[in-house]
């Protein structure tokens, strides 16, 4: 795991080039931490290391991949230090704790008094307006009034909200004193919000305080607009002569009428159907070796979002940017794979023309990647340099596989990171080849914008939507269309409502902004009344989206694929108690025992359970091909009483590789698809210490449409995040992974699965005792009568001849540990029992459960 801070940027503003670094590992909870100069830089799940041997310093695995630079005061403890002591170490305290005393008890540690030659905590030797005690607290130098040497005193920086120990608080390349001089905001990288950093604007000679004054774009090294191209060569219109050659003209077709209507050359486009363009003159070696950067942009109209559809790649491995995981923009460098945040299936549902503008950026200096969708940042994060070799290709990856399918227009490539403002302008129709922000008439509208929309008057309102042309440019709305996003509200009305005039459904709740305006819901909030249900769901269900006490009814669960309750099972077959008929086959019978006289006490069938000891149950009727290959989803659920939390104890798996959900990393619920491995947030070692009976209810879900996984613990969400489809093949197994390895150890009960993601409310209900097979239970209580005169209760339930039953009760739907009778003889097809109210007439409510013995 990386820390959050890129040291290239961090050290640029550091005076001496030294940092204090700390790594901790808490074995009891499997938690790791990274500290940078005393501040937590990352915290998260971390399993114990493998391998063997003693400690080495300066490298890994006997000495490889070694550190270069100076080191000092290396110290190791066999425990996790508290954060306060780590902070003190970063401020100059000695790892020898005896030197961290405060003998005069004045609040200033002795080491700090010695370091700066100070004694009085209330004195201000540097006359910066801060007492020594205050300087200790904020880590400033009590003998220097301007600790970070940015021209602003420590006290003034505190007053202004800037950092007195970082000369460039917003990390825009201008120190805080310089920003104060020129009037820019030292807390904002881009003061005027035009997409260009203050430093970039100063360097370019534009005004960082005026959003209509922006730098010109650097020229690209490749620009393909597909206008007037023919044959098997696509001309590079950038002037760099990096022409592209078509390797398969049948699947890469030029001259398609109708390019991107929002682009600068809307006449023609190119159609790719897993076809390929070779750009042999653009060698990617500098990027591969970590010395280079890139920006790739294109207008896209995809007609197939399934699977992997890559647009930018290289001859061998390395870069593969495009569409992946069934509809997400994706950036990958043969590893370091990342989706954008937006599912294009949903996004394009509300798009008029089906075209999007996509941009991928990689900053080789800071190892940072970015994905933009229609000029808006869709993802940003750490990204390693690509591997592999070769030149740029367009239309696929790794020499041409897994290719893009659809139309493309205005493909452009830069060998540098271009500013966000340029990306925004490209998505607004500017041309990559000559994107000048020139404004010849100095009216605030760039010339390219005036030409595109045939405008002259910046203060005019050509579409009568209540916004001037200048305001429309700043918003990037269409100045000749009153309702840019076609949602029924004018752009001016949307600005007033604070909804987006560029997105018809601002909050993405399924209701467009006009519909929300009409019914009174908030178009910027998907759940207006904060009751946990989206506005659309409430409207469809007939409940009131403006009243949190009015909620939709919970939909019943569909029939599961199977339900194993282990009641009455014998031999090597586990009977499916649902209507699906997917019985289980016990494999390695010595490692599985059924008819254990302890079921989950909170479950729907607490009579008996199954015991696993690294054995597994095969469920041949539940094949996983639809999940693996066809975009299928799942919900997997069970009551568990683990007796071993060490290492890896998987519960749900498949015949070959793929799904392995269970317990991992010494005590965390875990979801994995042979890759895409994720822990839940809760360490079960701690959790079960406070648990009365040792049973937990665990649920794993996978939403294939959105590639989202979830883990629930006792009905509460324990983790949610991105999860791609599993690989491998075969059917479901229970008790291990990959045909049966690394199996679960402990008891299990009420095991079930659905081929969709069930409602979270149902997860909670099943975790509190409801049965997954509902009305299909073998028996039901069919009648309840209360006799007030005698305080007696009479229950009738469907039964089977020759069986006996147990009748349990409680008053809170909590623990079912009280019984009326545990050996009630069956009355045939139905059984009736009359008994005294066990809680007396004062009780307000009482609940009963019948169990077949």
Image (tube, grey):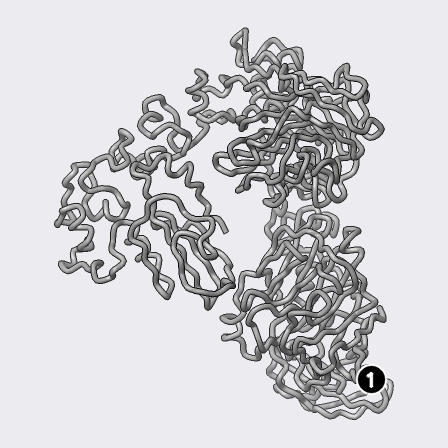
Q: How many marks?
A: 1
Residue density around tag 1, few if under 14, some if 14–19, many if 20 or more, within 10 Å: many
In this view, the residue in front, 822 or 72, is 72
Examine the rendering and report whether any part of residue 520 can be seen: no
Q: Position of residue 846 (x, y in %)?
A: 65, 79
Q: Is residue 91 above or below residue 686?
A: above
Q: Which of 131/299 is in front? A: 299
Would you say residue 94 is visible in this rendering?
Answer: yes
Q: Is residue 251 left or right of residue 433?
A: right
In the rendered image, residue 506, in percent from the top left (x then y), is placed at: 64, 37
Q: Residue at x 76, y 20 (%)?
A: 233
Viewer-proximal residue, 281 or 206? Answer: 281
As drawn, 848 above or below 66: below
Is 224 above or below relative to 44?
above
Kind of element beneath mark 1: loop
From the top left corner, tell me how far across and down residue 239 is, in percent.
63, 14
Farthest-out residue, top: 441
- Residue at the spot 59% in from the left edge and 25% down from the top edge: 414
With 140 as the anchor, is 620 left or right in this view?
A: right
Residue under the point 73% across and 32% down: 395
x and y percent of residue 410 in the render?
Answer: 69, 22
Q: Which residue is mark 1?
A: 799
Residue located at (56% from left, 72% from top) = 645
Q: Is residue 640 above or below residue 464?
A: below
Quarter of the picture containing the C terminus is bottom right
Q: Quadrant of residue 509?
A: top right
Instruction: Looking at the picture, tell me which residue is in the foreground, 69 or 544.
Output: 69
């Amino acid at each position: 795991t990386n820390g959050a801070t890129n040291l290239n940027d961090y050290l640029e503003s550091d005076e001496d080039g030294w940092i204090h670094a700390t790594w901790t590992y808490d074995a009891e909870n499997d938690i790791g931490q990274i500290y940078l100069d005393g501040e937590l830089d990352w915290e998260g799940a971390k399993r114990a290391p493998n391998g063997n041997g003693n400690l080495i310093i300066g490298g890994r695995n006997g000495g490889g991949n070694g550190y270069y630079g100076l080191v000092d005061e290396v110290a190791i403890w066999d425990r996790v230090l508290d954060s306060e002591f780590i902070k003190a170490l970063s401020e100059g305290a000695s790892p020898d704790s005896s030197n961290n005393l405060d003998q005069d008890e004045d609040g200033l540690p002795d080491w700090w008094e010695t370091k700066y030659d100070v004694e009085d905590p209330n004195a201000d030797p540097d006359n910066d307006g801060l007492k020594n005690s205050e300087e200790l607290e904020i880590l400033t130098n009590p003998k220097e009034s301007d600790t970070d040497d940015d021209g602003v005193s420590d006290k003034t920086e505190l007053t202004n909200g800037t950092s007195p120990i970082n000369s460039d608080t917003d990390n825009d390349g201008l120190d805080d004193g310089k920003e104060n001089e020129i009037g820019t905001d030292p807390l904002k990288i881009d003061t005027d919000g035009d997409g260009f950093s203050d430093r970039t604007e100063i360097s370019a000679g534009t005004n960082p305080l005026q959003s209509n004054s922006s730098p010109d774009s650097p020229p690209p090294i490749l620009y393909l607009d597909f206008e007037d191209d023919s044959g098997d060569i696509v001309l590079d219109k950038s002037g760099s002569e990096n022409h592209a050659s078509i390797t398969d003209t049948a699947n890469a077709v030029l001259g398609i009428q109708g390019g991107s209507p929002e682009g600068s050359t809307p006449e023609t486009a190119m159609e790719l159907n897993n076809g390929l363009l070779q750009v042999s003159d653009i060698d990617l070696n500098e990027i591969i070796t970590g010395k280079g950067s890139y920006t790739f942009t294109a207008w896209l109209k995809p007609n197939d979002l399934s699977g992997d559809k890559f647009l930018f790649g290289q001859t061998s491995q390395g870069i593969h940017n495009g569409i992946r995981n069934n509809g997400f923009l994706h950036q990958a460098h043969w590893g370091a794979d990342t989706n954008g945040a937006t599912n294009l299936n949903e996004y394009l549902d509300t798009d008029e023309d089906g075209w999007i503008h996509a941009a991928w950026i990689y900053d080789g200096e800071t190892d940072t990647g970015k994905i933009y969708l229609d000029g808006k940042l869709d993802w940003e994060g750490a990204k390693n340099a690509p591997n592999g070799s070769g030149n740029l290709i367009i239309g696929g990856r790794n020499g041409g596989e897994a290719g893009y399918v659809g139309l493309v227009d205005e493909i452009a490539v830069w060998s540098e990171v271009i500013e966000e403002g340029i990306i925004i302008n490209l998505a607004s129709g500017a041309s990559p080849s000559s994107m000048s922000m020139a404004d010849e008439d100095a009216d605030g509208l760039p010339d390219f914008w005036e030409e595109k929309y045939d405008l002259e008057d910046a203060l005019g309102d050509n579409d009568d939507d209540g916004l001037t042309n200048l305001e429309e440019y700043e918003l990037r709305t269409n100045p000749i269309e009153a309702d840019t996003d076609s949602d029924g509200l004018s752009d001016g009305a949307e600005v007033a409502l604070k909804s987006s005039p560029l997105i018809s459904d601002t909050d993405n709740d399924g209701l467009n902004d006009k519909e929300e305006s009409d019914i009174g819901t908030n178009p910027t909030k998907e759940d207006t009344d904060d009751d946990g249900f989206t506005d659309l769901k409430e409207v469809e269900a007939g409940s009131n989206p403006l009243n949190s006490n009015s909620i939709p009814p919970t939909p019943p669960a569909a029939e599961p694929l199977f339900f194993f309750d282990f009641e009455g099972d014998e031999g090597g077959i586990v009977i499916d108690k649902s209507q699906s008929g997917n019985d289980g086959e016990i494999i390695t019978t010595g490692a599985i025992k059924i008819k254990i006289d302890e079921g989950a006490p909170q479950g729907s069938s607490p009579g008996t359970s199954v015991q696993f000891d690294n054995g597994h149950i095969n469920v041949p009727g539940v094949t996983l091909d639809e999940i693996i290959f066809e975009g299928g989803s799942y919900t997997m659920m069970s009551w568990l009483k683990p007796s071993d939390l060490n290492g890896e104890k998987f519960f749900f798996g498949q015949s070959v590789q793929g799904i392995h959900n269970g317990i991992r990393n010494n005590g965390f619920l875990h979801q994995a698809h042979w890759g895409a491995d994720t822990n839940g947030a809760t360490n079960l070692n701690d959790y079960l210490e406070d648990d009365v009976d040792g049973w937990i209810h665990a649920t794993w879900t996978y939403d294939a449409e959105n590639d989202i996984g979830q883990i629930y613990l006792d009905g509460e969400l324990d983790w949610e995040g991105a999860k791609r489809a599993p690989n491998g093949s075969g059917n479901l197994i229970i008790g291990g992974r990959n045909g049966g390895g690394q199996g679960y150890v402990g008891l299990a009960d009420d095991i079930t699965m659905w081929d969709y993601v069930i409602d979270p409310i149902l997860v909670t209900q099943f975790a509190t005792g409801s049965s997954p097979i509902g009305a299909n239970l073998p028996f039901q209580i069919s009648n309840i009568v209360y006799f007030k005169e005698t305080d007696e209760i009479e229950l009738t339930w469907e039964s089977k001849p020759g069986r006996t039953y147990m009748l349990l009760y409680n008053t809170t739907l909590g623990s079912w540990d009280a019984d009326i009778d545990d050996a009630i003889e069956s009355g045939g097809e139905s059984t009736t029992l009359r008994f005294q109210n066990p809680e007396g007439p004062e009780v307000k409510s009482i609940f009963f459960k019948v169990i077949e013995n």
